[in-house]
Each structure stands twice: as structure tokens, then as C-alpha cells.
Image (cartoon, rainbow, N blue to C red):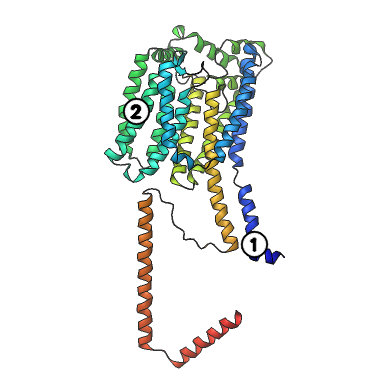
């Protein structure tokens, strides 16, 4: 019965087992474990940072955002990542429309970061994801022309200038830096020349500094940060409270002074969550969080390097740049190493828009990882049943269809060359003839092969 079923379906038990293993192994357990650790530790730290001031209010709301974020991540993981290559332009247009809308009807929070819907939604968080998807799709389609001025540098400068300009108009300069880091990383990895990268930095840095100076409040943050190091008597009260909390925090949660210090720092559960981790778990906690982000970056780069196509690789690189740069900015702000930015700690800080966008980015990585794992498992599955008869062609890094056509022409030329050599060899052999002993040996070998069959 088993043999009959195998004959009808063309499948063997080994092949069916290989297909089952392909489905089971398509889940990136390592990445999921890292993200789950972020979420759980973030919930605990949000409760610790906000309990003295607001009880469990922020904790309950963050738990709801985490639940919704898990759903968003799962949906993004189930959608094939190539779908976003076709939706890149519409998604970018929607993001630009939201950035324009927030300038017209949005609300301003703490002098920057305009929001919609009563402060519940930040379009700049959507812009981060849109830049990852659109720039990756654009670079993948133009990878052979990235070094060109008219086809590579200028179109990229227009794309990034438009998005970054709209975000700068919202006076959200830290998001501008993150978006530029995402775009420049994808551009450089996708084939951009280092000289082009230097030129973009040469143009963008003065523009960004001038916009920060004109905004007023951003320049005040820079001078306040300078004073905390070199002129504490003129430093802002918020930074003085933050540094005092860092000095008093030694992991002694039972000490009432640490809770009083936490209550005096506004936004501790969002903008300065890493400082709260340092106060509660000084060495172990801070080292654990930094190690988690390093592990996330390492795993995300692994997903990018093993992606089944160039578009997936570029998206993986973009997500890696996004999460690691934003985490570095938040950690630097919390330790007063850089001026205050208001950027949350990815996956951990309180805030719905940031958490949902980060979870969507994580879902993209899981989708890319799943596609790569299924491709490898499919190869192994056919190797068990029939032998892997496919040619080992390198994944094209650039050129698209043109590169594929070039490979086809090269394969046909090589095949014609081998056929010509065989014909010439056959004619030469027939011309020389063969001895009776050689013919007898050949006939004996043929009979032996037929007998073995």
C-alpha cells in the first residue's frame, strides 16, 4: 500500500518528512527569543520607572501595546517579503502624505515630534519603515547604476531629501538622523561609492546643524548638555535630576530615595528608560541590554546575509541600522553622553507608535528569515528524493533580468563549445580507428554494466 501510494503521488516518506521539517524549521527561534526578552524586560522596567509617579497606569497601557505589537509582528512575518517590493512606492507615498498632514493638522509635543489623533500616533515612526522598504526596493532595482550621478546619486538625494526635509520641518531631528542612517547604509551596501557617501554627508551635515540652530529648542538642548559637563550651575533641571538619579541608584530598590529620584525625572519610562535600568540593575542590567542589542544586530545581519534575494538582504541591513542606531542614541542620551533626543529604546520604552513600528520591522526580519530557511529546506528536500540537479548559480547582486539573460547566453555558449569539442573528438577517433583488443574490452564492459542493471 505504501509503495502504491508513493507511485501515485510521486513522493517518498523521506520527501514528506523533509517538507514537514521545512515548515517546522522556518521559524527563527533565536530572533524571537531576543525580541521576547526585550518585551518582557521592557514591561518590568516601565513599571519600575513609572510606579512612583503613576502606579500601574503606564504598565497596563504598555502591556496592551505589546499584545498588539505581537499581532503586528506575526502578520508581517507571514506576509512574503517580496510583497513589499511591489508595495514600496504606494507605502512611501502614504508615509509622505502622513508627514505632510502632521505639518498641517498635527499637534506639537515638547516643542518637537508632531503627532496626529491627539498625540497617539507619530507618522515619523511610519517613515522609518517606509524608508527601509522603499530605499531597499529602489537600490535593488538600480544596483548596476548606483555609481552614476544621474541614475544613482541624484535620485537617492531627492528621495532622502524629501523625507528628511519633512521630518526636519516637524523639528524631530533625532528621527531625521535615524532615517538618514537607514538610507545611507542601504545605499552604501547596495553599491554606492564611498565618495558619494562622503559627498552626501558633506551636504547633509551643515543643513541639519543649521535647521537645529533655527529651531531654537534643539540648540538649547545642545547647550544644556554642554553645561551639564562643563558648567553645571547653568545646566537644565531635568538633566541635573537625571544625573542625580544615576548617582543614587545602586540597585537598592528598597531605598526610598531612589523612588523619589525616579519621580522627579519626567519621561523616565520612555526617553530615559536605560537610565532607569542603570539605577535598578547597575552592571548586570546595563550589560544585559547592550548584549541583547548586540545579539539582535548580529542575528539581523545574519538574516540579511542569508536572504534569498538582494531586496531581502537590503531590507535586513536597513532594519539592523534602524534598531542599532536608535538604541545607541537612546543609551547615549540616558547616560548624558549626547544631548537629549527624546528617542525611545526600541522594543522596551513606553510608547505605542515606536513599539508597533519596531515590531513591524522585526516581522520583516522574520519573513526574510523564513523565506531563506524554506529555500534551503526545499533544496535539501529535493536532494533526498531525486538528487539536487539544479546548477549552482551565484545569486545575482545586480542587473536583474539583464544579468539573468547574460547568464543564459553564457550557459548556451558554453554548451555549444562542449558539443563542438565532443564532435571533433569523435571524428578524430573514428579516423584513427581502434584495435580488435580495444573493441573486445569495450564490449565486455558494456555486457557487465547490463548485467548489473
Instruction: Tell me: 1 left or right of 369.
Output: right
User: Which residue in the protein does label 1 denote?
Assistant: 12
In the rendered image, which residue does mark 2 sit on?
Answer: 161
Quarter of the picture containing the N terminus is bottom right
Q: In which quadrant of the rendered image does the C terminus lie?
A: bottom right
* Label at residue 266: none
In this view, the residue in front, 287 or 453, is 453
The vertical placement of 83 against 291, above or below, is: below
Q: Is residue 405 above or below residue 263?
A: below
**Residue 128's x, y, as percent?**
45, 29
Q: Is residue 129 above or below residue 78?
A: above
With 203 as the anchor, is 85 left or right in this view? right
Mark 1: few/some/many CA within 10 Å (<14, 14-19, 20+)? some
In the rendered image, is residue 284 in sight? Answer: no
Q: What is the distance, in whole Å, between disc 1 and disc 2 at their CAs?
A: 56 Å
Q: Residue 153: x percent and y percent?
A: 31, 36
Q: Quadrant of residue 147?
A: top left
Mark 1 vs mark 2: give the one in front.
1
Q: Secondary structure at mark 2?
A: helix
Mark 2 surroundings within 10 Å by alpha-carbon count, few (fewer than 14), some (14 through 19), many (20 or more): some
Amino acid at each position: 500500500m505504501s509503495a502504491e501510494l508513493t507511485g501515485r503521488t510521486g513522493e517518498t516518506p523521506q520527501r514528506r518528512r523533509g517538507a514537514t521539517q521545512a515548515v517546522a524549521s522556518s521559524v527563527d527561534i533565536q530572533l524571537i527569543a531576543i525580541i521576547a526578552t526585550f518585551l518582557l524586560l521592557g514591561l518590568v522596567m516601565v513599571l519600575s520607572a513609572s510606579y512612583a509617579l503613576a502606579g500601574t497606569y503606564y504598565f497596563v497601557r504598555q502591556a496592551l501595546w505589546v499584545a498588539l505589537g505581537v499581532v503586528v509582528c506575526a502578520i508581517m512575518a507571514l506576509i512574503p517579503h517580496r510583497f513589499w517590493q511591489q508595495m514600496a512606492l504606494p507605502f512611501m507615498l502614504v508615509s509622505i502624505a502622513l508627514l505632510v498632514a502632521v505639518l498641517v493638522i498635527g499637534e506639537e509635543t515638547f516643542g518637537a515630534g508632531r503627532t496626529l489623533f491627539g498625540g497617539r500616533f507619530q507618522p515619523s515612526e511610519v517613515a522609518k519603515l517606509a524608508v527601509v522598504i522603499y530605499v531597499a526596493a529602489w537600490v535593488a532595482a538600480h544596483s548596476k547604476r548606483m555609481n552614476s550621478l544621474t541614475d544613482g546619486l541624484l535620485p537617492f538625494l531627492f528621495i532622502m531629501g524629501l523625507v528628511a526635509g519633512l521630518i526636519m520641518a516637524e523639528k524631530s531631528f533625532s528621527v531625521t538622523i535615524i532615517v538618514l542612517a537607514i538610507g545611507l547604509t542601504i545605499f552604501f551596501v547596495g553599491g554606492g561609492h564611498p565618495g558619494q557617501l562622503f559627498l552626501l554627508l558633506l551636504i547633509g551635515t551643515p543643513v541639519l546643524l543649521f535647521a537645529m540652530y533655527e529651531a531654537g529648542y534643539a540648540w538649547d538642548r545642545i547647550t544644556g548638555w554642554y553645561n551639564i559637563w562643563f558648567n553645571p550651575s547653568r545646566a537644565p533641571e531635568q538633566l541635573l535630576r537625571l544625573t542625580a538619579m544615576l548617582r543614587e541608584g545602586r540597585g537598592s530598590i528598597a531605598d526610598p530615595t531612589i523612588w523619589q529620584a525616579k519621580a522627579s525625572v519626567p519621561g523616565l519610562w520612555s526617553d530615559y528608560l536605560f537610565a532607569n535600568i542603570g539605577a535598578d540593575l547597575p552592571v548586570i542590567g546595563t550589560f544585559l541590554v547592550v548584549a541583547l542589542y548586540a545579539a539582535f544586530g548580529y542575528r539581523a545581519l545574519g538574516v540579511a546575509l542569508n536572504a534569498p534575494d538582494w531586496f531581502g538582504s537590503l531590507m535586513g541591513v536597513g532594519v539592523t541600522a534602524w534598531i542599532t542606531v536608535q538604541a545607541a542614541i537612546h543609551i547615549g542620551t540616558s547616560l548624558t553622553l549626547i544631548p537629549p533626543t527624546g528617542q525611545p529604546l526600541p522594543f522596551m520604552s513606553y510608547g505605542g507608535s515606536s513599539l508597533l513600528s519596531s515590531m513591524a520591522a522585526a516581522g520583516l526580519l522574520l519573513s526574510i528569515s523564513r523565506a531563506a530557511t524554506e529555500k534551503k529546506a526545499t533544496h535539501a528536500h529535493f536532494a533526498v528524493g531525486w538528487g539536487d540537479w539544479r546548477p549552482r548559480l551565484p545569486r545575482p547582486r545586480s542587473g536583474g533580468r539583464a544579468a539573468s539573460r547574460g547568464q543564459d547566453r553564457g550557459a548556451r555558449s558554453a554548451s555549444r563549445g562542449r558539443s563542438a569539442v565532443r564532435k571533433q573528438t569523435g571524428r578524430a577517433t573514428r579516423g584513427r580507428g581502434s584495435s580488435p583488443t580495444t573493441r573486445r574490452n569495450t564490449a565486455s564492459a558494456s555486457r557487465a554494466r547490463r548485467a548489473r542493471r
